[in-house]
Image (cartoon, coloured by chain):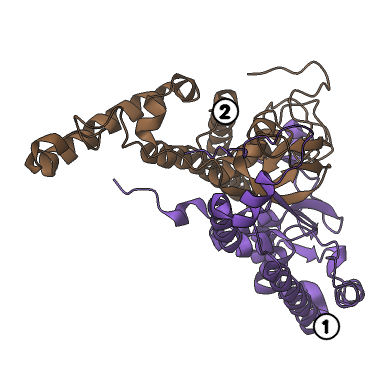
Chain colours: A purple, B brown
Amino acid sequence: MVHLQETDLLFTPAELEFFAEDEEVEIVPNFQLQDLVNDDMLNIAAGTYGPFRPSSITQVPLWMALMLHKRRKCRINPPAWMAAAQLEAVLEGERNRPEKFQALPFHYQEVAHLLFTHAKDSFGGDLVQVQDLVAEVARVRRNKIQAGLRELQSALSAVKLLDLGYMEVNQIRPFFKASLDRFFRLLPLDPERQEAAEAEPTPGQRPPPRQLRRGT
Amino acid sequence: MEEDAGGAMRRLSLSPLTAPRNNSQLPFTPVAASTERERSSDLLDLRNAYVNEKVAPELLDYQGDLVTRVEELIKHQETLLADAEQTPVGELVRLMRAQSLTRARYLLRAYLRTRLLKLERFCVSVLNDPAKLDQLSPAENHCAQDYFYEEGRGVKEAVLQHMPENFQSVLKQHSKLSLEKDIMPAPNLDAYVFVRVLADCGQVAMDAAGDETVELSEGDLLVTRYRGIRDLLRDKWLQLV
């Protein structure tokens, strides 16, 4: 039997893509699905999708869009947030507001990567520009995250993360866990904290230092 | 098969992330479906259950009903797959159905497998705790006991029987000096986990003394100690990420 490793509790990049593939995108099919039993809708494990008619837009999960696209059965419309102008605005926002992250879809990096790899023609002439913009946005955000991580100096009960993407969350997960866990374990040894506990002013007699119980 | 009273939300979850758009039809009943697309809420729930299980340091409640529903969904889709038409479009349908099935099966396997891995690691502490045992499925319960027995036997034969007399126990460091079973790997409930808040919780105490509180609002993403949010997770106020 193989014992549980630390890495078993992390998500692999393939798994992150798997989750991202559930995101819905617009497609324009070039075939017609006729199914009287199901009202011309496609009824599969993931749910009910359709209708599929030539030259009319329908929303499907990304995995399905890519599958159909591979067989030249549809055209994929890039999501609205991936328009060059939109991304430029996001990049501008990231640069001008270093204290916050711009709102982007949770799986923005995975979706972008999948589309760039398997559906390049969806972007037309804008492909290179959009690729560059996404890469630049990711880079600026990564720098912001690094800067934020450097500020971690002590055990904190909670750290609020603003609008991070899932890929970014998973990139910092091992570091965050390790450092925060370590800070927490060192807490009982922190002399400042022990002094503060002892020096609590109360009316009347001084209570004994509070014993902090830690779990085993 | 669970039945819905026309449109009622069947989930405890308050989550906008897991609530399906149109809840009036189970996705796998072959009667005329609505002409709106509709995601399978069961698969979304399974995905959330899997992520929870993967991130949480301890074994969580077994989602028996959910697993049963997903198994039935898979079985139903497999029968539909067998009836595929032999036309070009029929071939496409078959492909998409097969792929969706593969994804569903993967999720189910991943969920069960993650639980088994945690069970193996914390076998003794789970078997020792009646509350924990209740959280297992019957199959997992059986598996845990078998695993403990087999592993114990293997360790005894290979190593322990050759050790000095007082050090031959699987569960105690020293047969005479240890007052209780002290070789019991237990999950680290103070591990830090990433959390997505599903509904406003107000101020929540993060430690037993109630000194440190955090405001949890819907949509927040944060990193915090598992112990502080354990109950909130169980009651579906938040989702691990």
Q: Position of residue B10 (x, y in %)?
A: 75, 23
Mark 2 highlights which residue? B63
**A67 vs A183, nearest the viewer:** A183
Q: Position of residue B131 (x, y in %)?
A: 49, 21
Mark yes or no: residue A102 visible: yes
Instruction: Say above or below: A183 vs B42.
Output: below
Mark yes or no: residue A44 visible: no
Tell me where residue A67 sits by quadrant. bottom right
- Residue A125: assigned label: 1
Labels 2, 1: front one = 2
Chain for disc number 2: B
Q: Amino acid at mark 2?
A: Gln
Separation of residues labelled 2 and 1 (CA atoms) = 48 Å
Instruction: Say above or below: B2 vs B158.
Output: above
Q: Amino acid at mark 1?
A: Gly
**Residue at (73%, 73%) from the top-left corner?**
A147
**Residue at (76%, 41%) from the top-left corner?**
A201
Per the image, label 2 sits on a secondary structure element best described as loop
Chain for disc number 1: A
Q: Position of residue B155 (x, y in %)?
A: 18, 40
Is B220 displayed left or right of B113 in the figure? right
